[in-house]
Amino acid sequence: MIDKITLNLNNTTVQNPTTQVKRENQTAEIVDKVENGGEPEKKKWLVLLYSAGDNNLYSYLFDDLDELETVGSDKNTHIVALADQGKYGTKWKGAKTFYLQPDQEKGKINSPVLEDLGQVNLADPEFMGQKIGEIIKKYPADYVTVIISDHGGGWEGAVEDDSPNYKFMSLSEIKQALQKAVEVGGKKIDVLGWDACLMAMAEVGYELKDVAKYMVASEQLEGADGWPYGSIFGSTLKDVLKTAQQMMLVNIDVEPKDLATMMVKAAQNFTHSIKTLSAVDLEKAQNLATKTDELAQAILNDTSSFNKIKNAIRNTEKFYGSFRDLGHFAKLVQNLDVSDEIKQKAAELEKALNEYVVKEFHTSAHPNATGVSVEMPTWGSPSYSYQDTSFAKDTKWDEMLSKVSG
């Protein structure tokens, strides 16, 4: 008699004829091969968690890793974690790479350690690129997902490492690192997930459009136990991978767009901590930037529109600091008493956004969120460092903001 496990993920139901015991035995065989220096077999998916916990998030990132270990690798998935607990960790110090296998014991990582890296800097672009690339190359798969888990600051960057010297990666450094990873690994990242605050920005997607196919991120801060800077994606990712594995065990294909969409759907189960999440198609990032540029140029062509545009910015859905929702802004502009050219370009931008965003959700805390935020101050020009983003270099967006809000 066939065992059946039914798992619902926002109306996704999968019948799984393989028992948990069989999955664990299959994974143990894979681990034995890896530990004995053999070449891992090619699988459908490689899921890599890059967990940068050498900072005040160490305990939350450990919990995320612990959640992910309850799923573990199986015949269709390699699940590898490069997890740094830095000087703060109570379970271990420094960084280790794990090949995750199913384990239900909470509070302890029992999966085999592939490499004990000691005290390293996960915010160093060269280190990040080399290590992610090596893992992509060593654990071959049809598709690759990389989840970067740590502090995030939108276009200002992400990934903080406190020791031995404090380092926070700029967006250009993240691009440099992931370009290196693609070069070393020999494969583009299929799904890039940000378990970090504020990374669902037009500027971030545009910067990373050549290293990944899809990106999953939040417009707003993510929460952990009531405070707004933590990492809580572990439960979401656990649900998604469990569902994906069960789908593949019954020969249902899970492709990159599917996995990215599933992540967004699963996050709706954790609205106490995740207020927004979106999956975007980075192949459409160039068109989005082009349409944003055209709207900015149309506004610059009509100086009489500046005060009206500034008021629209003030009324646009706001997240953290000067980060506001690009789609909501485009909607508001179309209802202003401005030139037909501006209205037309705003409508074209809204259309481009609808093609760029594959799936998004938002809670009532952000009723006008559409999945993509952008730098949009209501006074003054964007900061000097904003000019370093590719988005600012390649569009008139920052020039428009300086004229309108300066």
Image (spheres, grey):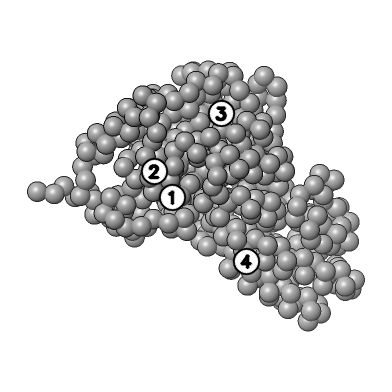
**Residue 80 horizontal side relative to residue 226, left or right:** left
> Type of residue at label 3?
Gly
The mark that comes first in sequence, 2 or 3, is 2
Residue 316: mark in rendering: none
Residue 335: image location, x then y, percent: 71, 76
Label 4: element kind:
helix
Q: Is residue 32 above or below residue 377?
A: above
Residue 344: image location, x then y, percent: 73, 78
Residue 122 visible somewhere in the drawing: yes
Residue 53: mark in rendering: 3
**Residue identifier under label 2:** 42
Q: Is residue 396 above or below residue 171?
A: below
Name the residue at 67% across, 19% down: 164
Residue 1: image location, x then y, percent: 9, 48
The mark that comes first in sequence, 3 or 1, is 3
Label 1: element kind:
strand
Give the mark toward the camera: 4 or 1. Answer: 1
Tell me the crowding category of disc 4: few under 14, some 14 to 19, or many 20 or more residues within 10 angstroms, Cα based: many
**Residue identifier under label 4:** 353
> Type of residue at label 1?
Asp
| Quarter containing the C terminus | bottom right
Residue 60: image location, x then y, percent: 50, 31
> Type of residue at label 4?
Leu
Residue 142: mark in rendering: 1
Give the mark toward the camera: 2 or 3. Answer: 2
Give the Cα distance between marks 2 and 3: 29 Å
Tell me the crowding category of disc 3: few under 14, some 14 to 19, or many 20 or more residues within 10 angstroms, Cα based: many
**Residue 28 horizontal side relative to residue 82, left or right:** left
Tell me the crowding category of disc 1: few under 14, some 14 to 19, or many 20 or more residues within 10 angstroms, Cα based: some
